[in-house]
């Protein structure tokens, strides 16, 4: 390959760490040199607007659409995304089919006095930007009040220390990358808080006709993560999930079997629909479709406006 490869990423500290991981993997699996692969930080609308729920200003696409535009216009060759922040339906002309090995998908709690969720004072205020997390923790403690919190991890932790919140819920993967593990008060099992579909997965996206780039990406794709990502994301596709869809989905592979579980909440969070199935690993995509259909039927579309 003669030209340099341009990787586009959000400009946050965490996103740039993800982009660097992608670059390292590409260099390890090709004859490219360090100077052949360049990371370009891109500011997205999701990064600029930090005081409103994503669902009110355009949904998950606010993080990915600006980067995807640069990709389609050939200003970059590869886009790096946190898979959980991507819309369920692929953008026409693009291909998201390469995934790095999954990081820890669990959720964590950070509190002011290192207390666990059950030990917080009465009527605690918990910061989260996710309806799913809100409904899940209210299922554990009904006296909790949730308030919107957005911004990067450093900002969220500072808001907690400033006394705006009693606790915040974040993904373990981001905390690990940023080396904030000493701040963690509690780690929730995936059974207790089923994470977002694709949580902990770094996705690499290219133009769907760029054979040269696709051949490079194929060499860095992690096969098990690929199957888990598609299995979980297929649930979202069936449900046509967006930012308002409170859904958790998590898969595990054991030998030649894949187990997928998911929970879906009604819009008001009062009803919960759950499904879990195990099948042969080669049916990973079908399994996601099946669970999506079961949840859609059970919920009778109560998760949609």
Image (tube, rainbow, N blue to C red):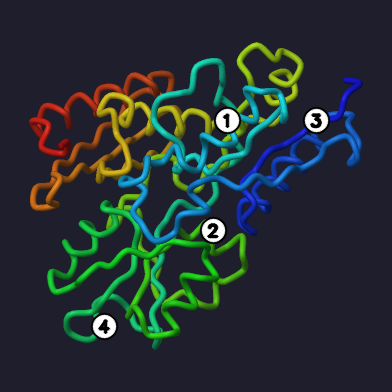
The foreground one among 303 and 31 is 303
- Which quadrant of the figure has residue 301? top left
Q: Are marks 1 and 3 in contact (CB under 8 Å)?
A: no
Checking the image for residue 174, the label placed there is: 2
How far apart are the two marked residues, 2 and 3, measured between alpha carbons?
A: 26 Å
Looking at the image, residue 64 lies above or below residue 107: above
- Quick one: quadrant of the C terminus? top left
- Which quadrant of the figure has residue 84? top left
Numbered disc 4: secondary structure: loop
Which class describes the residues within 10 Å of circle 1: few (<14), some (14-19), or many (20+)? many
Looking at the image, residue 149 lies above or below residue 38: below
The numbered mark, 4 or 3, whose residue comes first in the sequence reads 3
Residue at the disc numbered 1:
68
Q: How many marks?
A: 4
Residue at the disc numbered 4:
120
Numbered disc 3: secondary structure: strand
Numbered disc 1: secondary structure: helix
The numbered mark, 2 or 3, whose residue comes first in the sequence reads 3
The numbered mark, 1 or 3, whose residue comes first in the sequence reads 3
How far apart are the two marked residues, 4 and 2, measured between alpha carbons?
A: 24 Å
Residue at the disc numbered 3:
5
Comparing labels 2 and 1, the label whose residue is closer to the camera: 1
Point out residue 74 in the picture as x, y percentages from the top left corner.
71, 23
Which class describes the residues within 10 Å of circle 3: few (<14), some (14-19), or many (20+)? some
Numbered disc 2: secondary structure: helix
């Amino acid at each position: 390959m003669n030209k340099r490869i341009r990787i586009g990423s959000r400009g946050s500290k965490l996103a740039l760490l993800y982009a660097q991981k992608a670059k390292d993997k590409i260099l390890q699996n090709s004859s490219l040199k360090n100077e052949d692969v360049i990371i370009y930080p891109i500011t997205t609308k999701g990064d600029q607007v930090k005081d409103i729920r994503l669902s009110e200003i355009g949904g998950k696409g606010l993080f990915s659409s600006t980067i995807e535009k640069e990709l389609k216009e050939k200003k970059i060759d590869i886009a790096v995304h946190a898979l959980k922040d991507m819309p369920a339906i692929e953008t026409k002309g693009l291909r998201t089919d390469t995934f790095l090995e999954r990081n820890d998908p669990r959720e964590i709690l950070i509190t002011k006095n290192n207390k666990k969720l059950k030990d917080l004072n009465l009527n605690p205020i918990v910061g989260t930007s996710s309806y799913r997390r809100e409904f899940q923790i209210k299922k554990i403690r009904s006296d909790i009040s949730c308030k919107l919190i957005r911004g990067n991890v450093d900002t969220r932790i500072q808001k907690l220390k400033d006394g705006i919140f009693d606790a915040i819920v974040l993904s373990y993967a981001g905390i690990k990358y940023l080396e904030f593990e000493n701040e963690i008060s509690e780690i929730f099992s995936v059974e207790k808080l089923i994470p977002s579909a694709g949580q902990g997965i770094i996705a690499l996206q290219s133009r769907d006709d760029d054979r040269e780039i696709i051949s490079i990406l194929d060499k860095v794709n992690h096969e098990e993560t690929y199957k888990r990502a598609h299995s979980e994301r297929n649930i979202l596709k069936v449900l046509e999930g967006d930012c308002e869809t409170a859904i958790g989905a998590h898969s595990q592979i054991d030998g030649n079997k894949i187990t997928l579980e998911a929970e879906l909440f009604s819009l008001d969070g009062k009803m919960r629909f759950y499904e879990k199935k195990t099948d042969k690993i080669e049916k990973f995509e079908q399994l996601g479709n099946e669970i999506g259909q079961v949840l859609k039927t059970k919920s009778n579309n109560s998760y949609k406006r």
